[in-house]
Image (cartoon, rainbow, N blue to C red):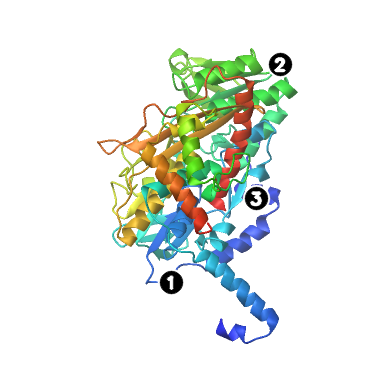
Amino acid sequence: MAGISRRDFVKLLGTGGAMSALGLTGCETVPKSKAAPRVVVVGGGFGGATCAKYLRIYDPSINVTLIEQNTSFFTCPGSNWVLAGLRKMEDLSQNYSALSSKHGVNVLHGKVTAIDPAKRTVTLSNGKSVEYDRLVLSPGIDFRWNAIEGYDEAASQVIPHAWKAGPQTVLLHKQLQAMQDGGTVIVCPPPMPFRCPPGPPERVSMIAHYLKKEKPRSKILILDAKEGFSKQDLFMDAWNELYPGMIEWVPGSKGGLVKRVDPKTNTVYTNDGMTSHKGDVINIIPPQRAGEIATASGLTNKEGWCPVNQHTFESLMAPGVYVIGDSSSAGALPKSGHTANNIAKMTAASIAAQFRGVKIPLPSIVNTCYSLVGPEYGISIAAVYRLDEKGELVGIKGAGGVSPRTAGSMQRTLEARFAQGWYSGITADTFS
Amino acid sequence: MRKLITLNKAAYCAAAGVAALLSAVAIQAQEISRASIIASTCYTCHGTYGISPGTIPSIGDLSAERMSNMLKEFRSGQRVSTVMGRHASGYTDDEIAEVSQYFSNLQKRGK
């Protein structure tokens, strides 16, 4: 199936004209004031958008500029629900108008190509530069193309990753819709760390829900790079209950590790290339690293993520630069939209406190991740994180954990409703 | 702005609208404290300032006493919950008192 470009995708949604107009006006809003402290935030996902909003909430005298390439943002949370037919792509679309009109954030649509921590400037692809007193980078993830032989950006137009919501989600959805009953869907989750650890099993669940309804003779094969996965017992119990016999999970050591992909024949190879699996639909979620601008700016460690001071979220590589969201490596924090939203608020407080000359409070970070296994079957994992004596963010013992394995249908139904409530809450808290 | 106010009524109303918008943006700076940090973590599910847009209950209008009692009951398991017991177990009595008072203070200042 041919790939869908972002331009085509925006046209499909019928909002291209309005977005272009917004983009032009956005370019006029480079901050001019020298008096107010200036913070530039790069990246308008859950981390960046939240940080921009909360900097203005903590201190409206701060001049905040959010630089984001796109005029709309499709959330990864909820994108698995699209595959099940429970949501439409439009439902996942967020924009930056409230950040601008309600919170006074300067929203600038452009691509940052370089940062200069010594001169305290960022350079845009149009050659313009923007000065800052503090810089916050929230560039999300990028993929390690070719870490799986044969899986590069071109291959992802045939075998989607769908791990950045948007055209890739639509491509995977269309492939599932086009598949014949009795087909095999292969899902290949990456090794840790990666964006949204419970995302792959939720995706499998949502695909299973669709197949059970529309193509009940079909199978799902999970070829996993890992030896286990998030909320594993809960997912497997639910799969046995809701989708018996449909899903097979193969851990890395038992032949799940994918070494090579051939997009021409829709085949993946495991066991050092000795075993082949042909799929009717294949979803490869590739190994990941920090977003490109963080990597290109030398802010990453040898594992490809950005080490930060876990109290303030200032980069350990560049003073005055803060790295938040999935790109940052901060103790036990998982890479999730919820965590990114919480880190963003802590970072906003940390920067506002410095400008105000007051003590930066110790961080308190929460993660809450709901997964839908079926439309009325939800499960969750939660944690509260604090700094330990070594300055590492660790989960508080005795708090958090997963939904009880023995919970009844009432809790599963409530958590399915709360999963949708969580989506409403976090998107409003981030973008409204 | 002064010029606009000397114009006709429609222009005055427009100016007043803009002023209202500006004042909505130019709200006072907020305290930066342990309580503000903890409260902001509640907003992710319960909505900014605890005003929920969805199926998760709003908490922004609870009195300090009621919020504090509820959190302690979630923590002990006395109050049945889906996820709040797992969250509330992460906070001390002092933290619960501070965050409950913080929400109460937000109500007093109309936010």
Please name the amino acid that badge 2 sits on. Arg
Do circles 2 and 3 both sit on a common chain?
yes
Can you identify the residue that label 2 sits on?
A217
Q: In which quarter of the image is residue A407?
A: top right
Mark 2: give few (<14), some (14-19) or many (20+) Cα within 10 Å. some
Looking at the rendered structure, the secondary structure element under dot 2 is loop
Side of A59 relative to A217 (left or right): left
Q: Position of residue A24 (x, y in %)?
A: 58, 65
What is the distance, in whole Å, between disc 1 and disc 3 at their CAs? 32 Å
Quadrant that contains the N terminus of chain A: top right
The answer to whether B38 is drawn above or below residue A189 in the figure is: below
Residue at the extreme left? A390
Q: Do the residues labelled 1 and 3 touch (CB within 8 Å)?
A: no
Residue at the image position 64 percent from the left and 13 percent from the top: A244
Asked if residue A292 shows in the view, the reply is no
Do circles 1 and 3 both sit on a common chain?
yes
Can you identify the residue that label 3 sits on?
A10
Looking at the rendered structure, the secondary structure element under dot 3 is helix
The answer to whether A355 is drawn above or below residue A50 in the figure is: below
Mark 2 or mark 1, which is nearer to you? 1
**Is residue B44 or residue A185 the one in the foreground?**
B44
Q: Position of residue A149 (x, y in %)?
A: 46, 28
Mark 3: give few (<14), some (14-19) or many (20+) Cα within 10 Å. some
Side of B41 relative to A416 (left or right): left
Please name the amino acid that badge 1 sits on. Lys
Chain ID, mark 3: A
Q: State which tag comes first along the sequence, 2 or 3.
A: 3
Can you identify the residue that label 1 sits on?
A32
Mark 1: give few (<14), some (14-19) or many (20+) Cα within 10 Å. few
The answer to whether A382 is drawn above or below residue A141 in the figure is: above
What is the distance, in whole Å, between disc 2 and disc 3 at their CAs? 35 Å
